[in-house]
Amino acid sequence: MLRWCAIVVLACSGAFGNPTPEMPASYDTIIIGLGAAGCTAASTLSKAGKRVLALEAMDRVGGRVNTVPFGDGVVEVGAEWIHGTEQSRVYNLAIQNNVSVLPQDIDFEVYRSDGSIGDKAVLNELMNFSLSVIEEPPETPEPLGQFITRRLKDYMKEKYPALLADQDFVDNLLEFLDLVIDNYESSNSWNEVSTESKYTELGGYQHMSWHRHGYKTLFEILLNTYNNGPGYPNLDIKLKKEVTQISWPQDPTQDVVVTCKDGSSYRARNVIVTVSLGVLKERHTSLFSPPLPTEKVTVIDKMSIGVICKIILQFEHNWFANFNSFGYIWRNDDRMEVSGEDGWILNVGEVSSPMGCSNTLTLWSNGDIAKRVETLPEDVVKRKAMELIRRFMGKNRTIPEPIAMIRSSWFSNPYTRGSYTYDNLSTPQYPHARATLAEPLVDSSGAPRVLFAGEATDNTHFSTVHGATDTGFREANRLLTKAKL
C-alpha cells in the first residue's frame, strides 16, 4: 500500500514547527525517519512534554507516503488507502479532525490482450474466491500461489468444469491472479509468499481514500500543523539530514550520539529508528555502533521487502467511463509476441483510477520488474504504457495521448529501498522475526536506548500505514511508560 514540498533549511519552521535555536544540544529522544511511524512517535512524545528531535534524510515528511500535486488535484505516489475503519488510528484521526475520507468501490472490468472484454461476473467471482481462500490457510505452510491454484482448480471443477478444461484460459487466469496477489504483497511471485502469516485486516471498509485532501493530511494532523496549526514548540524537525551512525552506550550515564552525513551530531537519552527494512538491510553494518545483536541481524536478512512501481498518467478527458479498476489478461499467443526489452509490460496486470485527481489512470507493476521500470527513460515508459493501454482497451474507442506522467521510485530511493514488507517462505522458520526486529537495544541497566518502529515491526498490520502508526505509538509509549516506573 503507500506512497510535499522541498525544504532545504536544516531547522524547519512554519508548516512543520517553530525555529528552535535556543533548544539544548541534548534531547530526550531523537527520531530517525519521519514517515507514519516517526511522525506518530514524534507527536506522542511531544504531547507528553518531551524534547524531541526528528531527523529526516529526504526533503519532505511522509516516508513511503507521498502526496504529489497533479493535474487538478493530487495523486498518491506511495500508500493510497486507509485499510479498515475499525480500531484504526489513521481513520480515527481523520474523523476526529473533520476530514472526510471516502470509500472507493473497486468496480473491476477485465480486458484481454486481443481487446475483448472478459466475462466480468465470472472473472470477479474467481478472483474474489482466490482472495478469500487466503483467510483459510492450510495447516502445513506452503507457497501462497501453489495453495490458491489448488483451491481454485477444485472450485472450478465444481462450478466451471468447461473453463477448467480450457488450459489456455486457466494458464492466463493464473498469470493474472499472480499479478493481483503480487500487487497486494509487493512480491515478485505469489510463490514467494507464505500461507503462514499473522497479518490481520481491520474491520470495516478496506479502501478508504483521502481523495483531494491527500494522505499528506495525516502528517499535518500528527505534527499539529493541519489548518495552520502551530506545530509543537518542543519538537525540532530537520530535513535533508541523512544519519550515518548511531552510537549507543552500555553506560546508563551516557547519551546516545547520532551523527549525520553533513558532519553534524546530536545527543539524546534514546533514539527511535523508523527506517525501512530495505534501508536496514543495506546499512545496518555501518549504521549502528556497537553492531546489532546477531538475532536482529538474522531476521533483517531473512525478512523481505518488496517493490511496487506506479505509473500515473493524466488525460485531458475521462475516456474510460465509470469503471475505476481494470485487469489485463494476456493470451498466450499475444504474450509470445512481446520482445524481451518490452517484457516489463507483461507485469502490468492492474490499472486503477485514483480519487484525488480527474481523468487519471495508475498502472501497477511489482517486484524486480518494478525495479527495472524505475530506471527506464521516461519517454519509453510513457510510450510503452500507452501501447499497452491501447492494446487492451482501444479496440472500440480512440484513446488520447496523456498530458502528464509521474512514476514512483521506491527501490531506487536510497532512503526507502522498497515499498513494504511481506511474509516470505522463511516465515515458518522465523515466526517471531517482526517481534525480534522490534526489540529495543538496552544499556547495562536495562533501559531502552535504541528503539525500532515502522511497518516491518508490526506483527499483524505490517505493510499498512495504520500498522506503521501503531508502531510509532508503541515505541513512544514504551519510553513514556518506562519514565513513570
Image: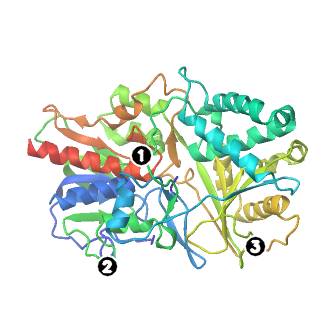
Which is nearer the N-term, disc 1 or disc 2? 2
| Residue 164 place in picture, x, y as percent | 81, 33
Total marks in image = 3
Contact between marks 1 and 3 (CB within 8 A): the answer is no
Q: State how the image is colored.
A: rainbow
Query: What residue is disc 2 on?
Result: 228
Asked if marks 3 and 2 touch (Cβ < 8 Å), the reply is no
Which residue in the structure is indicated by mark 3?
Answer: 319
Dot 3 lies on which element? loop
Residue for point 57% across, 68% down: 355
Give the image location of residue 369, x and y in percent. Answer: 68, 46
Q: Amino acid at mark 3?
A: Trp
In front: label 3 or label 2 = 3
Identify the residue position indicated by label 1 in the image.
455
Above or below, comparing residue 158 to residue 366 in the picture? above
Q: Is residue 248 visible?
A: no
**Marked residue nearer the N-terminal end (3 or 2):** 2
Residue at 12%, 38% (x, y): give it.
252
Classify residue 396 as left or right of residue 410. right
Foreground pick, 350 / 164: 164
Q: Real-space Cα distance between discs 1 and 2? A: 29 Å
Residue type highlighted by circle 1: Glu
Badge 2 local density, few (<14 within 10 Å), some, or many (20+)? few
Cα distance between the residues tagged 3 and 2: 38 Å
> What element does badge 2 sit on?
loop
In the image, which is nearer the foreground, mark 1 or mark 3? 3
Q: Residues within 10 Å of mark 1 (few under 14, many from 20)?
A: many
Q: Nearer the viewer, residue 298 or 210?
A: 210
Residue lying farthest top? Answer: 140
